[in-house]
Amino acid sequence: MHFTATFRRCALAFGLLAPLAHQPAQAQNTTKAASPAPAAHPGFVVQVIGKGRPVLLIPGLNCTGAVWDETVARYRSQYQCHVVTLAGFGRVAAQQPVPAYLLQDVRDQLLAYVKAQKLNQPAVIGHSLGGFLALWMAATDPSALGPLEIVDSLPFLPVATDPTATVESTRPQAELMRQQMRTAQLPPAARRRMTAGLVTDTARIALVTRWGQASDPATTGQAMYDMYTTDLRPEVARIQQPVLVLGTWAGYAAYGATKAGVQQVFEQQYAPVPHHTLVMSETGKHFVMYDDPTLFFSQTDIFLKQLALAVK
């Protein structure tokens, strides 16, 4: 399948400056030793809206919690929405310095937040990087969360461009990408062109472009480095709750991809998850909640009913 050009385009849309090259090596995760649960959460801010069973909503790279505005409007009368924005994304102030294990710290802080707020196995809806975090949280503490809805995300992103990729083969260019992003910012016009590969509506393109332009480059670079050097595939088999995966392929069609080919990538990566359901959007690009709201909301309605049934 010809995903490489597409994922280069997606990377550039968020300010990345170099495609990843792959050299065969032994797979390995880059993680620090487990640390005590943090008392606070400097890695993110949360807005709580609505009443009812708790739902945690985690946006993707460089996006603010506002990416979930329509989702919150639909469900706030029935669910208590905990809307996350990571520090350094949009106009939320970045951590100084940016942690060396940024996403692992955010993972631990989110799990600590769930426990501190006594959320009692909340459902989690995560888009892109937010979906990656949701998987990592559930694999780390399977009893802490309820059902997961993963919106266009994979346990190990580099395999989408190279089926033989490992953490070690990805690391050199991931490190180069991280270093370059600390000193460079994609011009707004270029970012807008690249963002058009991720979302269709012109107003949404402008919105996502503004979020990306306002985001802290060092935070973005570290977040992408963490995603490219963390392979969750060996860990996701521990996830016991139901997992709904919404995948997209339309954004890759111009580069020769087919629905069947992209679906195979998703199926291979989620095969170890015992209770998963994969639904592919026919028309949506990466921001499927914007591009294919009919599918997104119909599937999310069904997904959230699992949360209600689980507590009866």
Image (cartoon, helix red, strand yellow):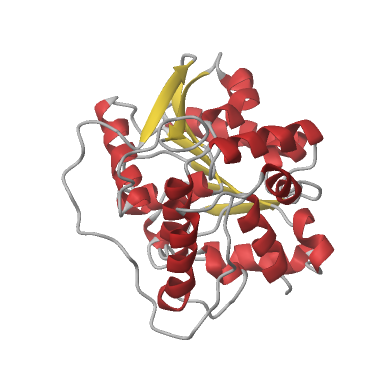
Give the quadrant of the N terminus.
Answer: bottom right
Return the residue nearer the eye: 258 or 39.
39
How many marks on residues?
0
Q: Which residue sits at x=37%, y=49%?
A: 103
Give the quadrant of the C terminus.
Answer: top left
Res. 293 image quadrant: top right
Q: Residue furthest front?
A: 183
Compared with residue 299, is residue 83 higher up or lower down, i.e. above or below? above
User: Left or right: where does residue 94 sit relative to residue 125?
Assistant: left
Q: Which residue sits at x=68%, y=32%?
A: 207
- Residue 24: x and y, percent? 47, 86
Res. 26 image quadrant: bottom left
Return the residue nearer the eye: 162 or 210.
210
Compared with residue 298, is residue 132 higher up or lower down, i.e. above or below? below
- Residue 271: x and y, percent? 53, 65
Return the residue nearer the eye: 72 or 119.
72
User: Left or right: where does residue 266 sit relative to residue 49?
Assistant: right
Q: Residue furthest bottom?
A: 24
Return the residue nearer the eye: 223 or 184.
184
Compared with residue 63, is residue 159 higher up or lower down, i.e. above or below? below
Q: Which residue sits at x=58%, y=61%?
A: 17
- Residue 129: x and y, percent? 51, 48
